[in-house]
């Protein structure tokens, strides 16, 4: 199995790491910036797709969910387990990709973390605006 084209050693680098786990060496700042923005784009695109899939699965699950008085304990337990799997899947995928890219293309990982920070900042700003709107609205009707 040590032939030139079909060697199992071809899947590893000279240091023994698999090729898919070798870090990218950036030669220019433009490459770093491009990978960073690719990471931000991956974060937002992935989470939009995952959110749409969760909404679709949730809408479908509402039509087949077991009722509270259901006597079928197995289907109720299975439904609960599947619900938790679909709720935790985005977390597992996001964290897994960040860890993978941290080892292979660190600027993509930084871009994904920055995307999370951008999303968090947007949510905090919208929360502050919502609270201010609530105070203004409630204050206007109290006099």
Image (cartoon, grey):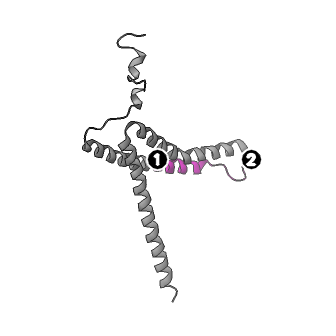
> Mark 1, residues whose alpha carbon is within 10 Å: few (<14), some, or many (≥20)?
some
> Where residue 70 sits in the image (x, y, percent)?
72, 49
Residue ID at (39%, 52%):
114
Main secondary structure type of the part rendered in magenta: helix
Q: Residue furthest front?
A: 15
The secondary element bearing badge 2 is classed as loop
Q: Is residue 67 one of those drawn in magenta? A: yes
Q: Quick one: 7 or 71, which is closer to the camera? A: 7
Q: Secondary structure at mark 1?
A: helix
Earlier in the chain: of badge 2 and badge 1, it is: 1
Q: Are marks 2 and 1 in contact (CB under 8 Å)?
A: no
Residue at x 48%, y 47% (from the top left corner)? 53
Q: Which residues are magenta?
A: 51-71
Camera-side residue of 140 and 94: 94
Where is mark 1, residue-wise? 50
Q: Nearer the viewer, residue 129 or 54?
A: 129
Q: Which x, y percent locates residue 75?
A: 67, 43
Q: Residue at x 40, y 14 (%)?
A: 7
Which residue, as the protein is rendered here, is positioned at the far right?
71
Count the marks: 2
Label annotation for residue 136: none
* Residue in view at x 40 percent, y 30 percent: 20
Q: From the viewer's perspective, is 49 left or right of 86?
A: left
Q: Position of residue 57 (x, y in %)?
A: 53, 47
Label 2: which residue? Answer: 71
Q: Position of residue 64 (x, y in %)?
A: 61, 47
- How busy is the neighbourhood of tag 2: few (under 14 within 10 Å), some, or many (20 plus)? few
Q: Is residue 5 magenta?
A: no
């Amino acid at each position: 199995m040590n032939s030139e084209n079909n060697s199992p050693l071809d899947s590893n680098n000279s240091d023994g790491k698999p090729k898919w786990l070798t870090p990218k060496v950036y030669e220019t700042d433009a490459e770093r910036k491009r990978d960073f923005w690719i990471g931000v784009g991956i974060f937002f695109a992935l989470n939009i797709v995952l959110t749409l899939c969760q909404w679709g699965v949730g809408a479908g699950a509402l039509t087949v969910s077991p009722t509270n008085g259901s006597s079928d304990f197995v289907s109720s337990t299975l439904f609960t387990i599947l619900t938790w799997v679909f709720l935790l899947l985005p977390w597992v995928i996001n964290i897994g990709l960040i860890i993978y890219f941290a080892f292979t293309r660190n600027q993509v990982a930084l871009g994904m973390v920055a995307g999370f920070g951008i999303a968090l900042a947007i949510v905090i700003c919208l929360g502050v605006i919502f609270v201010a709107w609530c105070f203004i609205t409630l204050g206007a009707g109290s006099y």
